[in-house]
Every structure is written in C-alpha cells, then in structure tokens.
Amino acid sequence: MEIVGLGTDLIEVDRIKAFAEKPGALARIFSDEEIAYCLARKNRYQHLAVRFAAKEAVYKALPFDGVAFKSISVVNLENGRPAVHVNDRRFDGLTVLISLSHTEHYATASAVVYRD
C-alpha cells in the first residue's frame, strides 16, 4: 500500500447553513442522494457540513487537481460507516479512507488516499 495523499478540513456549521439557504446552492455541490440523506436528519446542517468537510478533505488528499466537488460523493455503508465515491477516471486504482465528526457548531473530516 502506498499513501498518495492526506487531507483534512474543519468548517463552521453556520457557514453551511447560510450557504444552504440560497436557492439551488446545495445542488451545485451535493448529489441528490447526499441532499436527501442530510435533509431527512434532525441535525441536517451538521450532516451537510460534515459532508462538505469530507469533500474538502478528499480534494486536498487527491494527487491531482480539477476534481469537481459534485463528483466526490459521501455515502453511508450498511454498518453506518461513511465511505467516499469519486466519479473521475483518474481515481481508478485509488482508495479513500475517511473519518467524519461534527458537533453543534463545527464539522471536521480527514481523508487518506492510497494505492494498492
């Protein structure tokens, strides 16, 4: 295993809340599935913020530039753990490990990208 990148991000939940209240803003960054998942949660802005932080962390960890945020998707596995899918051919052969955490006011994410 070869680690090719490490990224982390921290964001204030209120910044995402203000962003989310603008018409069409969420659809520019999040997939339909991510939006549906977050909006169905009690603490929707925390969930949106932690997914935004995850996208930032993954973007910072990738060994190449020009990946659209919308092509980075954060999903939950059956066991509840978060996972990342990157819809970009340059990502073939790479794997992302991700860790997410949030409080009432902050959300953070860390990502490690490796190649087998």
Image (cartoon, rainbow, N blue to C red):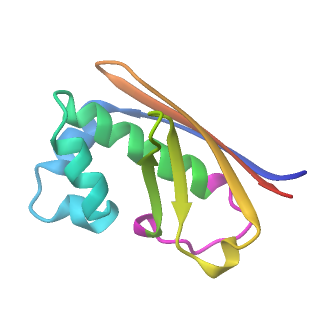
Rendering coords of residue 18 (x, y %): 17, 43
Q: Residue furthest top?
A: 104
First to last magenta residue range: 60-70
Percent across and percent down for residue 24 are: 14, 65
Q: Quadrant of the C terminus?
A: bottom right
At 43% from the left edge and 49% from the top edge, which residue is drawn? 75
Tell me: 21 left or right of 60.
Answer: left
Q: Is residue 91 above or below residue 40?
A: below
Residue 27 placed where, x, y %?
23, 65
Q: Of all residues shown, which one is farthest toward the right?
A: 1
Which residue is located at x 40 percent, y 44 percent?
Answer: 51
Does the stretch in magenta take in 110?
Answer: no
Q: Residue furthest front?
A: 78
**Residue shown at the point (69%, 77%) measured from the top left:** 90
Q: Along the horizontal axis of the image, is 103 left or right of 86?
A: left
Instruction: Tell me: 11 left or right of 33.
Output: right
Kindly report the secondary structure that dominates the magenta region of the rendered protein: loop
User: How many marks do you count on the picture?
Assistant: 0
Residue 110 rendering spot, x and y as whole percentages: 61, 37
Q: Is residue 83 left or right of residue 46?
A: right
The residue lying at 16 percent from left, 43 percent from top is 39
